[in-house]
Image (cartoon, rainbow, N blue to C red):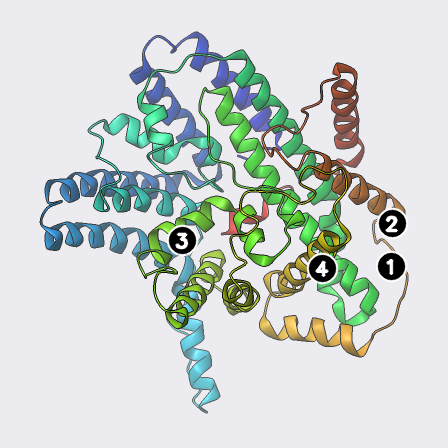
Amino acid sequence: MLFNSIEYLLFLPAVFSLYWFVFKKNVVVQNIFLIGASYLFYGWWDWRFLLLIFLSTVVDFFVGQKIYQNIDVKRKARYWLWVSMAFNIGMLGFFKYSNFFVDSFIDLFHTLGYDIKSTWTLQVILPVGISFYTFQTMSYSFDIYYKKLTPTKNFIAFTAFVSFFPQLVAGPIERASNLLSQIANSRVFNYAQASSGLKLILWGLFKKMVIADSLAPLVDDIFANYGTYSASTLIMGVCFFSFQVYGDFSGYSDIAIGTAKLFGIELMSNFKFPNFSRNVAEYWQRWHVSLSTWFRHYLYIPMGGSRVSKLKSVRNIIVIFVISGFWHGANWTFIFWGALHAVFYIPVFLMGRNRMYAHNVVGENRIFPTPFEIFQVLLTFALVTFSRIFFRSPTLTDSFQYIDQIINNFTFESYVNPMGYRMMDYYVLLAFFVIYEYLIRKDERSPFKFKSKTVRFLMYTIIVLAMLLFYDDGVNRSFIYFQF
């Protein structure tokens, strides 16, 4: 079920009404209802994959108990942690990566001159959100193992934690210390919290329907026909993709966080205006925060993090980014994309500038950014956008040919929108979007934090009208990160 669908428009008010007006007196009954609603939400795509979510829930609930029972016997505790990892990574590997490894094996032998027929390739359907909920359940086992959490004995609350529908299929990837504790305890309806949630939902829908969906046909056309376009069009295409994927994914996160607020639950922030980052390190502190922190806590720090020698720290950075790329998809393009970000990140780390912007924003205590900050933001955006050529292209060959076309056909030609709309409308839209996000850059959870009611009402009106104006029933409305 898509957040931007008619089905969800009917689903959400019905679940909200029953949750608060029928089941509010008993948190156990309320959580059972949440589980049912979440399983309905997920099963709307394919009910067969509900079994995978349930199995992941059962395994990590049981494993968490076993780890805690053996917490003072490291060997036994580690054994049960490996059970959780083997099950979740094994399930993820089978459904997401099995064909990748088979095809890569065959390609390797082809390069050596052997012709092997593919008899092991499986027609495996990728379950929506499997990369997200497997990481969420594993984090529960990790936190118990590292003595940051005691396991719950409340199976109903744990099941609701794993399957909580607002963030089930594309995050944020939550920690049990935040989400499970809220689900296990009684919740009281809070008007201010619900109002804040509705505003986030509205802003998220704007980013998805107006920014991402309006750019999607242009990006698809340019990347599908890159060999026929000039450098100016190809540069525009990948810049448009940067805005598309940001609007799409951060829009989903805003809707998820806003929806959770309607049910009295606070999720972690997942995007903190990454397009205003002043270096690549800051970018990763602001982009897909839940995944970045997951890798930091459960892989980078256990490997030694930055507490080891510089050489080993660089090794750790490379490993994290390559695995992060592989997490995104079973394709060498994603692995190369991750490695490229490691290349961008390492100089920042070696200069000791990887944490210098962790607690401030561009234009801190000023109306406008400094000229140097503008240069930093543009450079970071250029590097990140360049890497997205690999993220968006179907193969590495296409990626390099796209770049080659830019270099060898470095000309300017006006792009003719295949849908017939004026390109100036898109430029004005993106300019408005960038300026508005700059104005609200200090608080990602309050997109309409204006003192004037008139200004707020004007913004609501503009956004609703824009969604009606830019809505196109012919555009694929699914979210990009569903494929991960």
**For the residue carrying disc 3, how many other residues have a C-alpha within 10 Å: few (<14), some (14-19), or many (20+)?**
some
- Secondary structure category for the residue under label 1: loop
- Residue that mark 3 sits on: 295
Q: Secondary structure at mark 4?
A: helix
The correct choice, above or below, for 13 with respect to 218 in the image is: above
Dot 1 or dot 2, earlier in sequence: 1
Seen in the picture, residue 143 relative to 283 is either above or below; the reply is above
Amino acid found under the numbered disc labelled 2: Met
Separation (CA) of disc 3 from disc 1: 40 Å
Q: Which label was assigned to residue 238?
A: 4
CB under 8 Å between callouts 1 and 2?
yes
**Within 10 angstroms of label 2, few (less than 14), some, or many (20 or more) residues?**
few
Name the kind of residue labelled 1 in the image.
Tyr
Earlier sequence position, callout 3 versus callout 1: 3
> Which of the two marks, 4 or 1, is nearer to us in this view?
4
In depth, the one of 426 and 354 nearer the eye is 354
Q: How far apart are the two marked residues, 4 and 2, measured between alpha carbons?
A: 15 Å
From mark 4 to mark 1, how far is it between C-alphas?
A: 14 Å
Q: Residue 33, position in %: x, y?
A: 37, 20
- Sequence-wise, the earlier of marks 4 and 2 is 4
